[in-house]
Image (spheres, rainbow, N blue to C red):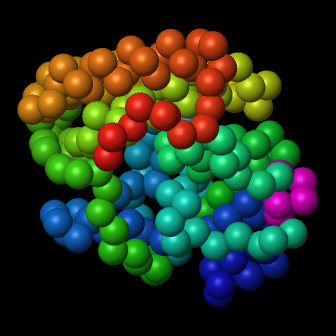
Amino acid sequence: MKAYNSIAAQGENISAVGPVIRDVRTATTAPFIRIGWFGTRRIFPDAEPVIAADFLISSGMLCSIETFQPVGLMREELFIDHVDTDWFLRAGAAGYNAWGVRDATMHHSLGEEVRSYSIFKGRLMYMHKPFRYYYTFRNSINLYRKKYATAKWISGDIVRLCKILVVILFNKNRYECYKMIVIGLLHGLIGRSGRYRGESN
């Protein structure tokens, strides 16, 4: 709240402020994200007390209810993945910016399993259950059609999805994961949303 009020006092339109996310399993700190062409810029909290970001994890974020008037509510039909991405894209299009707060920390767990691969320069990669990849790919296709989804974000997200396809090669449930990705892509192309009816867990 202190950071929010300080930023607001400078005349900034704030979509939300969010804490530093620390993984409870690895004790590593997740970076804040800025959109880049064909990738993202990862900014780790350092000297600056607040860091401009394009997206925040919705868990633990703080925003004013007044922000929902120009930006709108989060889209329930996306169901799990990209709910926060969609909202921050809309907020950015409406002229609202997100900020990460260095001195606020939230202990959290992302994914079912964490691994590190040399091909990605030792970056930690988060493994999910197969059904999660359905939502990841379906909702990406869903968002690519939106007017507020910028070409820069789309280019970076496509690169992210390609990396996921490679990482899944090391997943013990790789075949089921790829099956769910194909279904997700097909459902995304036909505009399906909501909960996947074939979800078993």
Decide if residue 44 is on the left or right side of residue 144.
left
Q: Which residue is more in the foreground, 73 or 164? A: 73
Highlighted magenta segment, given as a residue range = 67-71
Q: Would residue 160 be visible to someone looking at this image? A: no
Decide if residue 189 is on the left or right side of residue 28.
right
Does the segment drawn in magenta span residue 186? Answer: no
Q: Which residue is more in the foreground, 6 or 177? A: 177
Q: Which residue is more in the foreground, 53 or 107? A: 107
Q: For the view shown, which residue lies furthest in the bottom direction?
A: 2
Q: Position of residue 145 (x, y in %)?
A: 70, 20
Decide if residue 160 is on the left or right side of residue 123.
right
Taking the spot 41% from the left edge, 46% from the top edge, the residue there is 42
Q: Position of residue 39 (x, y in %)?
A: 44, 28
In this picture, is 84 found above or below 191? below
Taking the spot 27% from the left edge, 42% from the top edge, the residue there is 128
Q: Would residue 172 be visible to someone looking at this image? A: yes
Taking the spot 62% from the left edge, 31% from the top edge, the residue there is 193
